[in-house]
Image (spheres, rainbow, N blue to C red):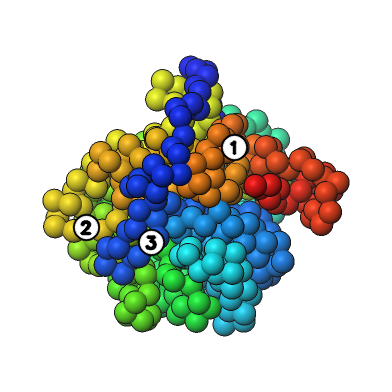
Amino acid sequence: MWKPPQRIRHQTLTAPWPAAEEAAQSRLFSLLEIGRLSLRERTWVPAMVPWRATEEGEVTDDVVDWYRRFAEGRPGAIVVEATGVRDVPSGPLLRIGHDRFIPGLKRIVEAVRDASGGETRLFIQIIDFLAIRRRPEREKYLRRFLGITDAHRDAVGGESDEEIRARLIDMSDDELRDVLDEREFENLMRGFRERVTDMDQPHIRDLPKTLPGIFAAAARRAEAAGFDGVELHYAHAYTMASFLSALNARDDGYGGARENRLRLPLETFRAVRTAVSDGFVVGCRMLSEDCIHGGSTVDDAAFFAAEFARAGMDFISLSRGGKFEDALVPKVGEAIYPYTGPSGYECMPQIISDEAGPFGRNVTPAEAIMKTVRAAGCETPIVVAGGMHHFMQAETLLAEGKADIIGFARQALADPDWFEKARLGRGDEINICKYSNYCEGLDQKHKMVTCQLWDRADLDAPGVKFAPDGKRRTLAPRWAR
């Protein structure tokens, strides 16, 4: 993962934790009721992919246990990991692209209801993503995958395609950069990746026709499985965020001006809203900034958020960065990972950072977006996340009107009982995240995600489940009250 050059070591907060009486009177642990969204408290566990599903996208016992463990802390809401809306191969990621996935998803709902005593609201994040391939072996790409064109013939000569390929193989990378076009060289060095701007491909050109219905069908399945709502994944490196991005130059009315870039995400939201019951919650996860050269800015995000709010979104959850465009070059045989570049760092900053540090990095952009939403006359709840780990951090943001709900991702992974410990006045017993991104490193390798604070703890305790490597427990130890 990219790291800032400043290498400044920051410290997690050490302010006193509230007594139980103070916590009970806090904003963080107070009721939120705005429109369809009703939460017992303003704590939120954002979507995190734990790599526990089957290769066919089915729910496993490990998936159920993962969400049950978070629910034991009884946060206001949990968002289930990014779940694919298409019924296509995607590795051990959950899917919701067919009715056969509903029974497994129901198991998650039932586990969370049981573990939280029905107090935690449960949403599922639904996502679409385009095709991506691993970085190929150099010779294999040039000999088999590269389509030989007249440009290649003019550049290197040769009587046959095989002769041209042989000459290309003999070239250095610097020489190839001059012969291949930009996309061909990228496919060689970073692996093939579809874009929403690949208008020569019929399935890409037709995304505005197909995606609203696909998302709507997925939302219907989510409601059938018993979820309280869906979070439309409009963030990071994936399809909907790519439509919103300023890099979207489609010429079919769905790219260019930001009103056009907003069009498909709005049409998809409306299709989803129509497909589910009136009480079913529909919100989105979006970026406060793309954090890449030429990408969308905070001003763009504020415009998008205000339009989503006017359209009737039930909540807006803000993240930042996490794009393919500035990701590090992958090794041969590996796929590009969108959280390895500077924009990825903005999404998941570490304890050793730049002057801005890893805590509350998204607060200032979120505040500007929230002000624009309020100026549009909308009370749509805004979820702010990013390095949140202490009660005082969260309470201050709520008191200053910079957020309506606080998202705890890595901190909830480090200690799923954070919420219960803080609520009971026992905050000193909380295991604070180290912000080393140990978990992110596992995610990058598509390994079962755990936390370094607990995955080697009490390994000989009865009933401990182990990750496939046999060295790590799959769940945080339960709190011995």
Q: Residue drawn at (46%, 34%), measured in percent from left and top? A: 17
User: Which residue is more in the foreground, 84 or 28?
Assistant: 28
Circle 1 residues within 10 Å: few <14, some 14–19, many ≥20: some
Q: Residue drawn at (43%, 67%), measured in percent from left and top? A: 230
Question: Which residue of the protein is positioned furthest toward the front in this rendering?
Answer: 21
Image vertical order of residue 32 relative to residue 152, above or below: below
The reply to whether residue 90 is in sight is: no
Q: Amino acid at mark 2?
A: Glu
Give the labeled residue for mark 2: 379
Q: Amino acid at mark 3?
A: Leu
| Mark 3: secondary structure | strand
Give the labeled residue for mark 3: 39
Please name which of the two marks, 2 or 1, marks the residue nearer to the observer. Answer: 1
Query: Would you say 126 lies left or right of 49 here?
Result: left
| Mark 1: secondary structure | helix
Q: Residue drawn at (73%, 51%), measured in percent from left and top? A: 474
Q: Amino acid at mark 1?
A: Glu
Query: Would you say 247 lies left or right of 420 here?
Result: left
Where residue 309 appears, as percent x and y from the top left, is 24, 60
Please give the count of numbered marks on the rendered protein.
3
| Mark 2: secondary structure | loop
Where residue 218 appears, as percent x and y from the top left, is 48, 75
Mark 2 or mark 1, which has the lower sequence index?
A: 2
Q: Label 1 vs label 3: CA separation? A: 25 Å
Mark 1 vs 3: CB contact within 8 A: no
Please name which of the two marks, 3 or 2, marks the residue nearer to the observer. Answer: 3
Image vertical order of residue 181 relative to residue 144, above or below: above
Give the labeled residue for mark 1: 429
Q: Residue drawn at (49%, 41%), measured in percent from left and top? A: 425
Q: Label 3 vs label 2: CA separation? A: 15 Å
Query: Would you say 147 lies left or right of 15 here?
Result: right
